[in-house]
Image: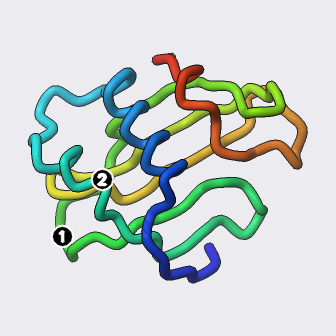
Amino acid sequence: MIPERRPITDQERDVVVTTVQRACVVDDLPEAVPAGIANLEVVARCECGCATVHFAAPPSAERVRIIADAAARTPRGGHVGVIVWGRSDAITGLEIYDMGTDADDLSLPVPSTIAPL
């Protein structure tokens, strides 16, 4: 990961929100976690050039787990996987991975195409 400190972009926020709404895989996600998405701060991005980012989160002994798991299409039509990582107190990451797209098309997906796996 490459260090990068900045606020979450509108596009990243839309992808995280939509993925959590449509493809949440945990039953015990406190309401405060999705409510805090708009205030997330990116602290690192993937070195490969994909749209994967890590978010700032308070220290915790709790393990990070998958909060939401989905598939989607990029603006160019590539098929990507979308995972929202987190804990009971915070969203910690947004992972975008290849599910049948060009290596140079691992961009944020179009939110309307996000669907549970």
In the displayed structure, would residue 66 be above or below residue 5? above
User: Residue shown at 59%/20% (left/top)?
Assistant: 113
Give the image quarter of residue 38: bottom left
User: Residue shown at 80%/29% (left/top)?
Assistant: 78
User: Residue shown at 15%/38% (left/top)?
Assistant: 29
Answer with left or right where residue 14 lies relative to residue 76. Answer: left
> What colour scheme has been applied to the protein in the rendered image?
rainbow
Answer with left or right where residue 72 lies relative to residue 11. Answer: right
Residue at image mark 1: 60
Residue 37 — which label? 2
Residue density around tag 2, few if under 14, some if 14–19, many if 20 or more, within 10 Å: some
Q: How many marks?
A: 2
Residue 51 picture location, percent across and down? 65, 54
Q: Secondary structure at mark 2?
A: helix
Label 2 to label 1, Cα distance in Å?
Answer: 18 Å
Residue density around tag 1, few if under 14, some if 14–19, many if 20 or more, within 10 Å: few
What amino acid type should be assigned to the residue bearing mark 1? Ser
Residue 15 picture location, percent across and down? 49, 40
Residue 111 picture location, percent across and down? 54, 30
Instruction: Identify the image quadrant of the N terminus.
Output: bottom right
Q: Nearer the viewer, mark 2 or mark 1?
A: 2
Whether tag 2 and tag 1 are in contact, CB under 8 A, the answer is no
Of residues 110 and 43, the one nearer the viewer is: 110
Residue 117 — which label? none
Q: Secondary structure at mark 1?
A: loop
What amino acid type should be assigned to the residue bearing mark 2? Ile
